[in-house]
Image: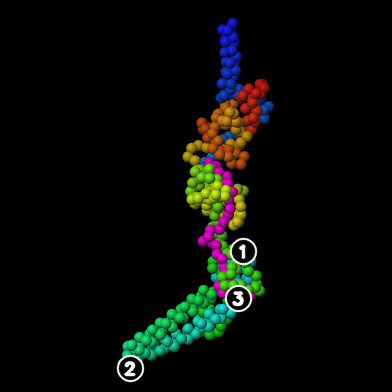
């Protein structure tokens, strides 16, 4: 009796195991049955890049491309010529300030320039007198010292005027005309776009008070927050795709410390080419991708069946489908990037994989 029970148990187990083993790599199905299940066939699409990471990012201006334009002297803002968003050229007048302090600097320059002319004339005269033997060499050295001191004072006064915002041409005209002018022109230090305006006409400002923020937007950066557990997956040179735009960037820097507040690493990417669809300060989503040397393919997510933690696709055969295991390398929107024992010419089920899985596992009905 025990022998008979053992034989029956073995037979039952064999009956259960054999269909499953047979179903591991094939699904026998007629073309009519395939049509009835609504299965749609498609081809594998070759892929050359691996999607590594989705992450938030912020568009920022490189620090070398941004400049705060400030008032070099205290005074009354009489005119502002640029608004937020305006394109300005280097040297363009952005504002005018009526500054009494500028009058003082101009007066100091004119006085120093007058003393220099006198010292220069005295020195030239003493050179001639020394040549004729009328004065001693010591007298000539004294007038030379006075001349050098006067020249130093003029140069100092001129530099103070330049720091105040006067150009070399303005200073030359001041020396020629001897006319003081309290109107100070504030010039743009670079060609770029006005990002912010921090002053209002008719108000008084102190020296070094900010008036404008101007930036050259020919180059923009992305600051990307990389989760600390993914730091090892990102490399300098990786390509970055910006969501909903054709713009790409390239990782140029990986930070050396983790932000303790959110446990992320800051990565920087330089945006390449056209930047018209992104703006400084904008928060966006990005995807980091890497090139791959092995054969990869892109397929719809609906073409993938999951079973016992593994992924499979269904490849069309004359008698139905063969079930092929695959590795999912990454995902992009509604598609997945896969690899496996594939040559790229296979015709696969891109729709109806759920029904095929049911038949494969013996959960669906036959023909």
Q: CA distance from mark 3 to mark 2?
A: 53 Å
* In front of the other: 346 or 68: 68
Do the numbered discs 3 and 2 sit on residues whose CB atoms are within 8 Å?
Answer: no
Q: Nearer the viewer, mark 3 or mark 2?
A: 3
> Label 2, on which residue?
134
In this picture, which residue range is highlighted in magenta?
50-79
Q: Residue at x 66, y 24 (%)?
A: 364
Mark 1 or 3: the one toward you: 3
Query: To which residue does mark 3 refer?
Result: 75
User: Are there few (<14), some (14-19), or many (20+) residues within 10 Å of tag 1?
Assistant: some
CB under 8 Å between discs 2 and 1: no
- Check the picture and name the quadrant holding the N terminus: top right
Is the residue 8 above or below the residue 365 in the image?
Answer: above
**Mark 2 vs mark 1, CA separation in Å:** 67 Å
| Label 3: which secondary element | strand
Image side of residue 310 versus residue 113, left or right:
right
Count of labels in the image: 3
* Residue 80 percent coordinates (x, y): 63, 71
Which of these two is toward me, 114 or 338?
114
From the image, tell me which residue sits under label 1.
Answer: 196
């Amino acid at each position: 009796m025990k022998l008979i029970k053992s034989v029956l148990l073995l037979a039952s187990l064999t009956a259960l195991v054999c269909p499953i083993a047979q179903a591991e790599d094939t699904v026998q199905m007629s073309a009519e049955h395939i049509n009835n299940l609504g299965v749609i066939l498609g081809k594998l699409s070759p892929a050359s890049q691996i999607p590594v990471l989705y992450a938030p990012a912020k568009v920022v201006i490189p620090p070398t491309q941004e400049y705060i334009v400030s008032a070099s002297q205290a005074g009354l803002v009489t005119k502002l010529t640029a608004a937020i968003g305006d394109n300005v050229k280097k040297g363009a007048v952005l504002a005018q300030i009526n500054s009494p302090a500028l009058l003082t600097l101009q007066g100091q320059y004119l006085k120093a320039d007058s003393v220099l002319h006198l010292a220069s004339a005295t020195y030239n005269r003493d050179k001639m007198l020394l040549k004729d033997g009328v004065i001693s060499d010591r007298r000539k050295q004294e007038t030379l010292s006075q001349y050098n001191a006067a020249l130093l004072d003029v140069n100092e006064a001129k530099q103070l005027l330049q720091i105040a915002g006067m150009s070399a041409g303005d200073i030359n005209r001041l020396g020629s005309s001897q006319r003081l002018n309290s109107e100070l022109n504030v010039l743009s230090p670079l060609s770029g776009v006005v990002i912010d305006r921090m002053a209002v006409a008719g108000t008084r400002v102190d020296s070094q008070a900010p008036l404008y923020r101007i930036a050259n937007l020919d180059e923009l950066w992305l600051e990307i927050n990389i989760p600390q557990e993914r730091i090892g997956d990102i490399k300098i040179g990786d390509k970055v795709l910006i969501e909903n735009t054709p713009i790409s960037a390239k990782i140029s820097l990986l930070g050396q410390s983790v932000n303790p507040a959110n446990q992320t690493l800051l990565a920087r990417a330089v945006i390449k080419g056209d930047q018209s669809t992104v703006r400084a300060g904008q928060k966006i989503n990005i995807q980091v991708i890497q090139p791959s040397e092995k054969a990869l393919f892109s397929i719809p997510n609906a073409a993938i069946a999951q079973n016992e933690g593994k992924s499979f696709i269904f490849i069309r055969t004359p008698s139905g489908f063969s079930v092929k295991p695959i590795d999912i390398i990454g995902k992009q929107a509604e598609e997945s990037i896969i690899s496996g024992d594939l040559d790229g010419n296979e015709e696969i089920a891109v729709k109806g994989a759920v029904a095929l899985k049911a038949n494969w596992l013996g959960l669906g009905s036959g023909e």
